[in-house]
Image (tube, rainbow, N blue to C red):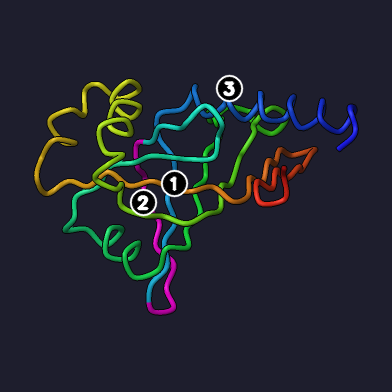
Amino acid sequence: MDKDKLGEVSTLQNRVRALFSSQLLCVLSTYNQGQPYSNLVSFAETSDLKTLIFATNRHTNKYRNAMLNSDVAVLIDSRTNTDSDFHDALAVTAMGKVAEVARDDHDSIKQIFLLKHPYLKVFVNNPDSSLMIVKVQLLIVAGFSEKNIINFNAQI
């Protein structure tokens, strides 16, 4: 990859990183039996943007859907519900595979999640709760005047 292209990717990743760190909630979309299903969930991200983390109760449709079909989409955006959104809002769709956090990684993933959401400690520690990770394969970055893609599968 040439130097200019690396700079563009780095700048775009910094914009995405800033958006992710400024938002507490995202829309998680799962799929089951021919039907899409979306939920508002709290999330955290790793610094490389390749992993998103959320917590859910194991007795929910989103958990069941994720266990049946690991393909998910996550929408994170900067809406403020003002007129300026039509010029300034940024939305990122993260597409990837979801899985329950492995026992070996549980403590480190939980730490990342609770650093962003310390008020969810009781929920995360509930035996019926599960920490989930989305391994991001593609980020689609869109505003009203732009669209960019970060494809983690294509990067070296």
Mark sitting earlier along the chain (2/3): 3
Where is 23 relative to 27, above or below? above
Locate the N terminus by quadrant: top right
Closer to us: 129 or 33: 129
Mark sitting earlier along the chain (1/2): 1
Magenta stretch in the rendered image: 33-42
Query: At x 40% / y 32%, what residue is drawn?
Result: 44
Q: Which residue is mark 2?
A: 39
Q: Is residue 34 magenta?
A: yes
Query: At x 80% / y 38%, what residue is drawn?
Result: 145
Mark sitting earlier along the chain (1/3): 3
Q: Amino acid at mark 1?
A: Val
| Image depth: mark 1 or mark 3 in front | 3
**Mark 1 and mark 3: span between their CA atoms?**
18 Å
Query: At x 39% / y 62%, what residue is drawn?
Result: 37
Q: Which residue is mark 1?
A: 27
Q: Which percent across, then down, holds residue 18?
A: 58, 22
Query: At x 36% / y 45%, what residue is drawn?
Result: 40
Classify mark 1: helix, strand or loop: strand
Q: Which residue is mark 3?
A: 18
Tell me, yes or no, whether the two marked residues, 1 and 2, touch with CB atoms within 8 Å: yes
Q: Which mark is residue 109?
A: none
Toward which corner of the image does residue 52 lie, by quadrant? Answer: top left
Pointer 3: residues within 10 angstroms few (<14), some, or many (20+)? few
| Image depth: mark 2 or mark 3 in front | 3
Locate the C terminus by quadrant: top right
Q: Which percent across, then down, holds residue 17?
A: 58, 26
In the displayed orientation, state which residue is furthest to the left.
Answer: 127
Q: Amino acid at mark 2?
A: Asn
Q: Amino acid at mark 3?
A: Ala
Q: Which percent across, then down, holds residue 74?
A: 49, 48
Give the prevailing secondary structure in the magenta stretch: strand
